[in-house]
Image (cartoon, helix red, strand yellow):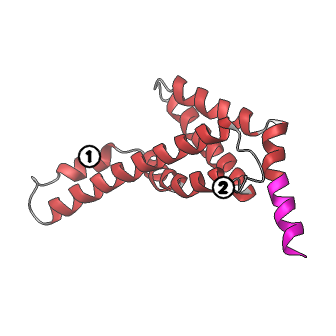
Amino acid sequence: MLQPKHKRPFGVIIIAFLLLLNGMLATARGAGIAYQFYEEQNGHLEPDKISDRAEDLTLIEWLTLPVTAAGIVIAWGIWALRPAAWLATMTLQGLYLAAQLYDYSQGQNVYPQLLVTVLTVFYLNQHDVKLVFHTISTTERSGSSS
């Protein structure tokens, strides 16, 4: 039986799951909006129903949908312990944090989302976690040169 070269930290599994779940929910939400738009264009919905809904979406929501859907790909990379996925996850968390701080400044209650984002950043920056991603990168580089 093949043993994995590096043990995947439990927190990385949780982060990959959260990224995947968030990406799937954002994709489903985006697909629902696109479907409503399609139905309105074909005359199956009352006029301007989707237009009214689209006007309710903020710029942050419009930008968050495609970025969060990319979380599905990033989740796979985190699961596979890819160094680029670590960087992509950190970047995504920065975008989430900016969006959440904007929402907070608009009076929304985003404390749970802020907590998850900050904990993710702190966890991924722990020395042991960074070492797992760095070790994979170094091992792949040295293995490909022989």
Looking at the picture, does residue 115 appear above or below residue 14? above
Residue 127 part of the magenta-drawn span: no
Amino acid residing under circle 1: Arg
Residue sitting at x 77%, y 49%: 6
The crowd level at tag 2 (other Cα within 10 Å; few <14, some 14-19, many 20+) is some
Main structural element of the magenta stretch: helix, strand or loop? helix
Looking at the picture, does residue 8 appear above or below residue 11? below
Q: Is residue 145 left or right of residue 85?
A: right
Q: Position of residue 31 (x, y in %)?
A: 32, 56
Q: Is residue 34 visible?
A: yes
Judge depth for marks 1 and 2 and give the one in front.
Answer: 2
Give the residue at the far front of this rendering. 1
Count how many numbered circles sit on residues in the image: 2
Magenta-colored span: 135-146
Query: Which secondary structure lies at badge 2?
Result: loop
Query: Which secondary structure lies at badge 1?
Result: helix
Residue 144 part of the magenta-drawn span: yes
Looking at the picture, does residue 98 appear above or below residue 146? above
For this rendering, which residue is in front, 122 or 37?
122
Q: Quadrant of the C terminus?
A: bottom right
Q: Can you tell which mark lies on residue 53?
A: 1
Residues tagged 1 and 2 counted as in contact (Cβ below 8 A): no
Q: Position of residue 106 (x, y in %)?
A: 48, 29
To which quarter of the image does residue 85 belong? bottom right
